[in-house]
Image (cartoon, rainbow, N blue to C red):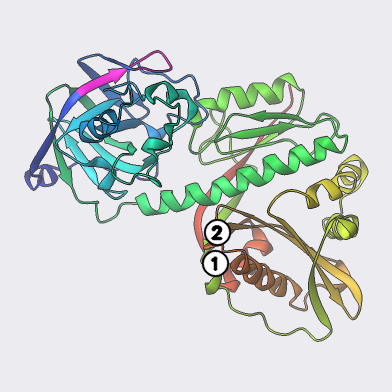
Amino acid sequence: MLGFAPRTDSDLAAAPATGRVLQVSASPGGVPKRSVGHARVGRFGLEGDAHHHDGVHGGPHRAVCLFAIEAIRRVAAEGHPIGPGTVGENLTTEGIELATLPPGTRLAIGGELLLEISNPANPCDVIRGSFRDGKSGRISILKHPTDSRVYARVLVEGIVAEGDTVRVLPPAPDNEAALHVLLERLEANERRFWLATWEAVAAAGADLRILDLGDAVACAGPGLQGGHFNAAYGLRFVPDVRDRVLEHFRSNGVTGYVVDLEPPLPGLEPETRGSVLGCEPGRIAAAAPVVGLTIREVGADESTAWETILCDGFALDGPVRAAWLAAAPAIARIPGMHMLIADLDGGPAGAAGLYTRARVGGMSSAAVLPWARGRGIQGALIAARARLAEANACTLVTGQAEGTSERNLLRAGMARLLVRGIYRVEAP
């Protein structure tokens, strides 16, 4: 698994004693989490601990939640009814300003356990009872940089107990914490795009059954075969919900396509593999000029023409094509959705989409009509979307692709960040 590495004695020998575990907390779900004295910590967190909202908590990248008592005391001093465990942290520490430590920092706890800080823990309404005004944003790292909880990965499993020493270690030379922080932003854009798109298609009349679990989403479209409307995204961060996603496919009688690093079922091999690519938009250079080519952004009034080009480019027909065409005006109205048409010598030759959210520009499907292929239009559409992402204040652009599409993105300047499997789960 990415980011999982053995702990060495030399790591421990160099670690200064900088703090201690004040409280170890767990619950069968929800808050507050209560002191349990000690617990064994495995890859997915503390034994005996659980979450009511497993689509946004838990998993290997958010296995353990930590919070500094120093931050708790600052918040409590303002009159908030907060204390150790009330906002759902597993380990309350003393002597370390946790929120100031960068991702990748390791925490050697006691004689066995080694954690790696993965990212800040975003507050949510579940913990609003710990705040006099119900506004959990008081511990958002964006508003109060020293007072956030943090999540951690488990590098080495072990026992944690109240009173254990906590030693701060620098990031390992080969750590992938920064990569995972980046991937979380890019994959969030992908998940939000598909959720918004499925909702638009459903609003246009298609029979789509959408499962929104938070950081994982799935869709089942009885009568609409293929991976557009029968797919799941986001399971890399919250693998605990795989069984719920598979049951969603089974209960709706569809063959599903699960995008993940690990097989959703034992022994299942990926039907194909796809890459997550990304870079700063400025790294994508201008495309070579194509004589007679113009690229323009269009609105809802030309959305059906835009969708027709995509359907023709991907040779879609039947109910799937009808569903896309019916939903085109609704897709055009998705906040952050941008539609581009490439005209060659005055006629439509290609189309592409860009979805901008949280300063990430996601390059969605792009297609060039068969008669216009091989002239550099795909490269021009990539460059045009990068410039559009910059104009919309995006600091990153991303794409999910395989085969020729991936090669086009790599040539344009994107980097391959992760290769995932696309697993076909047969209908019951």
Residue 228 shows up from this direction: no
Q: Are marks 2 and 1 in contact (CB under 8 Å)?
A: yes
What secondary structure is the magenta-colored segment mainly? loop
The residue wearing badge 1 is: 414
Inspect the image, locate mark 2, and give the three-letter code of the amino acid beneath it. Answer: Leu
- Residue range in magenta is 23-32
* Residue 122 percent location from the top left of the image: 43, 37
SS type, badge 2? strand
Which numbered dot is residue 49? Answer: none
Which quadrant: the N terminus?
Answer: top left
In the image, 95 versus 414, the foreground residue is: 95
In the image, 385 versus 179, the foreground residue is: 385
* Residue 136 percent location from the top left of the image: 43, 31
The residue wearing badge 2 is: 277
Residue 352 shows up from this direction: yes
* Residue 160 percent location from the top left of the image: 20, 24
**Does the magenta run of residues contain 161?**
no
Residue density around tag 2, few if under 14, some if 14–19, many if 20 or more, within 10 Å? many
Q: Quadrant of residue 303?
A: bottom right
Q: Please give left or right for residue 150 compared with residue 70 in the image.
A: right
**Does the magenta run of residues contain 27?**
yes
